[in-house]
Amino acid sequence: MRFIDSIKMSVKAGRGGNGCMSFLRERFRPNGGPDGGNGGRGGSIIFEATQNLQTLADLEYQRHVRAENGGHGKGNARNGHAGKDTLIYVPCGTIIYDAETNEGLADLVEPGDRFLAARGGRGGRGNRYFSSSARRAPRFCENGDLGEEVTLRLELRLIADVGLVGFPNVGKSSILAAISNAQPKIANYPFTTLSPNLGVLNTGFEHVVIADIPGLIEGASENKGLGLQFLRHIERSRLLIHVLSLENEDFDSLLEELETVRSEMRMYDARLDERPYFVVANKLDEALEPEVITERLRLHFEKIGVSFCAVSALTEEGIPELVAQVIAFTDAHPRPHSEVRLFALDEDEEEKTPMRRRGKVQIISLHGGGYRVIHKRLEKAVERYDLGQDENVARFTMLLRKYKVERLLEAAGAQESDTIFIGHKEFVFYPDYYPSDPVFEEQEAETPENQDFDE
């Protein structure tokens, strides 16, 4: 399976169903009254973390995801069905960003973590909802709201307890195979490992996840070699193991290699310099004088307080000692119950209804001609009201009068026949085209639906 740790995808929630305009017509009940049902809510897009996935490869060909639309309302007071939510499974450790602003939205660490990426649109209300003592036979209904649409960037950062790092061809994959159940590709040439490998070491008390990170070279923090592509995968590790190769028995050269790798990690993220680490010298079987070089290395790292171990992944010499050191570290530093998140999850708390404010209507003159009216309630109304129904036209006209839009447009210089944009719709400006209807305005003011928009 291909290792894919970064993809971009667009998600679109379902649109709410339209309300229905209907009147009851039954035998012996010729004037049964309005009975149009409400539209159903559109489906939402939800991401959920699972341990059954290791990469984002399953989403490689799902770059455009849409949720189900809500059903339309029907007569006889039948509401439309709610659209089915679309659940997208991602591996634990997936971070979700807004692809346009690069803002971090969620960090899904533990199995079962969920993130609501796009909320489904609210269903429109049928004419039955608007019936009242003042309005016995409403001949209008509402359209459903559009679902949210957003482009996301998903980035996987492996959740491994131990990360094996070092130059290419130092034997990281061989050590992983020797101390865990992993079976990575092993060969005697640089960059054999092109993607991280994961293995599990059973300590008897817990399963320690070990990641073999592809070889780093000087300039990796500037995206040279495999570069930044895999440096991110060591950010969550509790312990780093720096692997050196004893093919090169030059003491100073080995320390220089170690400092190069640590310097690249430091430039990528300064916090990695504070992460606990071991040093492992591999390929004892290929050294001409292994006792001399390993003793010098051991004395050097003892002075600076760093654990050191010399091993041969081929002959498994020193492997039990390395495993014992890893187990001792993990026992002394248990995995936290909840991994540190880079971005908090949204909490499902009941939102308090905000205080309703009328807000200020803004009029913007457009370069190509015409004017745009900006106001949250007006923009919602123009989408919800079906302007093919006469009573909805009257309702919308009354709303424009309430906010004095006509007067504001004239003050901004609008002339008759100018194009006016509100939300996604456009109108032609005709001052005083619709005369006021005091009876309709009185009915509208007495019904609760006149207060249904949040400012």
Image (cartoon, grey):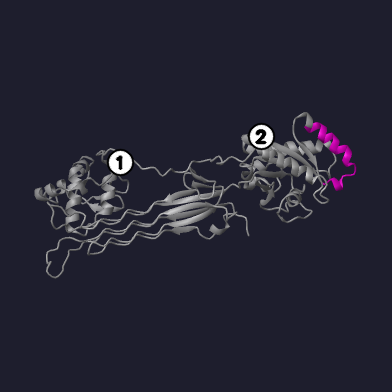
Which residue occupies 26% across, 50% down? 381
For disc 2, the marked residue is 273
Residue 256 spot, x, y in % from top left: 77, 36
- Rendered view: 101 above or below 28: above
Quadrant housing the C terminus: top left
Instruction: Check disc 2 and give the amino acid type.
Output: Asp
Asked where in the image residue 260 lies, by quadrant, the reply is top right
| Cα separation between marks 1 and 2 | 47 Å
Q: Is 118 covered by the magenta stretch? A: no
Label whose residue precedes the other's in the sequence (1 or 2): 2
- From the viewer's side, name the closer residue of 38 and 326: 326
Left or right: 403 as drawn, with respect to 298: left
Residue 213 spot, x, y in % from top left: 68, 47
* Main SS of residues in magenta: helix
Span of residues in magenta: 283-301
Residue 402 spot, x, y in % from top left: 18, 43
Task: Give the mark toward the camera: 1 or 2.
Answer: 1
Evaluate if marks 1 and 2 touch, with contact meaning CB atoms under 8 Å apart: no
Instruction: Please tell me the numbered disc located at residue 353.
Output: 1
Left or right: 429 as drawn, with respect to 303: left
* Residue found farthest to the right: 289
